Amino acid sequence: MTTPAPRSEVHLPAGAVWDASAGGAGSLPAAWLRHWRQDPERPQLHDPGRGWISRGELEGASARAAGRLAGAGLRAGDRVLLSAASSADLVIAHVACLRLGLVVVPTNTAYRAAEIAHVVGDARPCAAIVDDAGRGRWIARADPDVRVLGPELDLPDAGPPALDALEPGAPALIGYTSGTTGRPKGAVLSHANLLASCEALRLAWRWTPADRLLLALPLFHMHGLGVGLHGTLHAGASAVLLPRFEPDSLLDAAREHAATLLFGVPTMYHRLAAHPRVAELEPLRLCISGSAALPADLHARIEAACGQRVLERYGMTETAMLVSNPHDAERRPGTVGWPLPGVEVRLQGEPPEIQVRGPNVFAGYWERPEANAAAFTRDGWFRTGDLGALDADGYLRIEGRARELVISGGYNVYPREVEDALRAHPAIEDLAVVGEPDPEWGERVVAYVVARAPLDVAGLRDFAAQHLAPYKHPRALHAVEALPRNALGKVQKHRLRDGVVLPDDGS
Ligand code: MLC
Ligand code: AMP
């Protein structure tokens, strides 16, 4: 089943024409450069320690940073791992990499040594830009040839290199993401993919140079980086960088900087809804939620508290943004809305899986031909692994997942990865990790454990901390006699819930 019609016109402002190349810009920096040149004095980014930097300052600083990187021997196509809290320096370094044709590998700052070593081993970066000496040592241990730098790029200045001369198909990002089996794999996104998504969002969300985004999402995932930062630069707008999400400082920044936009994951909206100052969201032009399902009752609570009808949208690392509730028509809670301009969506199979196609969809995983064969259908559609249904008038609902995945606070956690890490603990005979509903996190990670010796919870926590980023740690541990298995020996995870093993219903 395909959506009734590619109703992307529902997203287009009157008279607007959809063009995936954004008027022939072709690459992200080429599109940004138009704004930088046009009005260099205009504020672009606010960094809490440094204040505002203008478009022209970003252009100049990123050109200098690109000169340093080129002087250090980095060349177009080389990978650079980026893992740091949000700051103007990080943005300058990121923009410099893209202008030079380097391929950025954004990496979660919560990763532990083994998680980082996997990314280093797989992507083989030439350099890493990190804001923590310990993380730098883990990278150097994983590969001593990687040049580890701070976000300020402590390198000698060098002559200006050729900048912004990129083919649309040139890779811009490799975003690491997991599957049900195997280690995380890198989704390679080209400049054309990311630009198409930015242009669709600019039109759909009526994003203009007058907008000012509160950006408290981390810059190492698609939401903060590909939507928040790239979208801001593409629209010629401005953003207030907040290195961590904290409702009071976010609301202070909204007032101080007259912000117009907020992007967040549902956990952020949950915390804001419970905050005594929630009514201060009222002056914003648009609040957008994504990365996980926004419960309809939370949508209603936000509206009642501050009058904002949050606009929910749906995307993935591999595809950037796919589907969005409309700006001008009904924003329907519990749905993600209509395919964005350029995006085609179809539902295939039983239960119906969401499959997508469009200029925003990546071409494949880094050096993983077998994963690519599984990820795309023979006729070229990307399998999202999400299950969907359409309302009669075409609004898409996400009804579940075909793959095993827990989304906690907008971060993806793969049960298999947590199981593999914890199974190595000497007191654990066997375990199964599942996601259970949680009002704050959406889902929380829970482990059902068959112990071979008495479990020391503090010791287990230390063990988990050595191997896994904290957001992957089980929030509850349930001791069970045995895991429920089917005749083939596969764990029946649907029988694990609320700390008990449910009886076998034959399914
Ligand atoms: C932090 N913790 C989490 C967690 N975030 N645990 C589970 N799930 C999470 N998401 C842990 C911390 O490690 C700490 O553990 C404890 O919770 C308390 O930390 P906190 O101070 O409350 O956390 P905070 O810094 O406030 O983080 C919450 C958050 C953050 C919601 C701000 O998780 C966040 O920024 N989420 C956004 C993720 C994101 O950008 N996703 C987009 C992916 S792209 P301990 O053990 O030390 O107590 C994508 C595509 C798309 O999905 O469509 O957008
Ligand atoms: P990631 O792999 O981190 O890019 O996460 C992408 C996944 O997040 C999607 O495949 C969905 O399962 C989920 N997701 C993103 N946005 C939404 C949303 N609005 N509602 C439900 N799930 C979402």
Image (tube, rainbow, N blue to C red):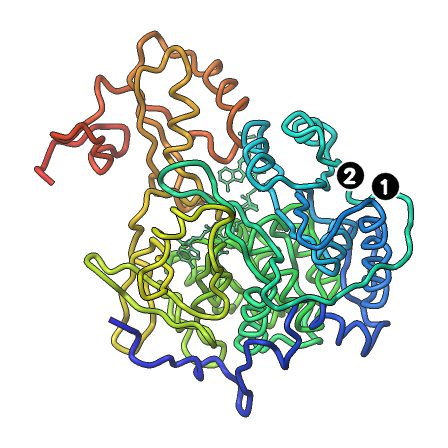
Whether ligand 1 has any atom under 8 Å from the Cβ at mark 1 is answered as: no
Relative height, residue 215 to residue 474 (above, below): below
Which amino acid type is marked by label 1? Asp
Q: Nearer the viewer, residue 33 or 207?
A: 33
Relative height, residue 497 to residue 363 (above, below): above
Q: Residue at x 46, y 30 (%)?
A: 473
Q: Is residue 33 left or right of residue 430?
A: right
Q: CA distance from mark 1 to mark 2?
A: 7 Å
- When asked about the image quadrant of residue 337, the answer is bottom left
Mark 2: secondary structure: strand
Looking at this view, name the residue that lies furthest to the top: 453
- When asked about the image quadrant of residue 244, the answer is top right
Q: Is residue 68 left or right of residue 116?
A: right
Cβ atoms under marks 1 and 2 closer than 8 Å: yes
- When asked about the image quadrant of residue 98, the answer is bottom right
Binning the other alpha carbons within 10 Å of mark 1 as few (below 14), some (14 to 19) or many (20 upward) gives few
Which amino acid type is marked by label 2? Leu
How far across and down, in percent of the image, does residue 170 sit?
62, 62
Q: Residue under circle 1?
A: 154
- Quarter containing the C terminus: top left
How far across and down, in percent of the image, does residue 282 sit?
59, 67
- Quarter containing the N terminus: bottom left
Looking at this view, name the residue that lies furthest to the left: 506
Q: Nearer the viewer, residue 441 or 171?
A: 171
> Residue 416's mark?
none
How far across and down, in percent of the image, does residue 30 sit?
71, 71
Relative height, residue 462 to residue 285 (above, below): above
Q: Residue at x 40, y 35 (%)?
A: 445
Mark 1: secondary structure: loop
Q: Residue under circle 2?
A: 149
Q: Nearer the viewer, residue 167 or 7?
A: 167
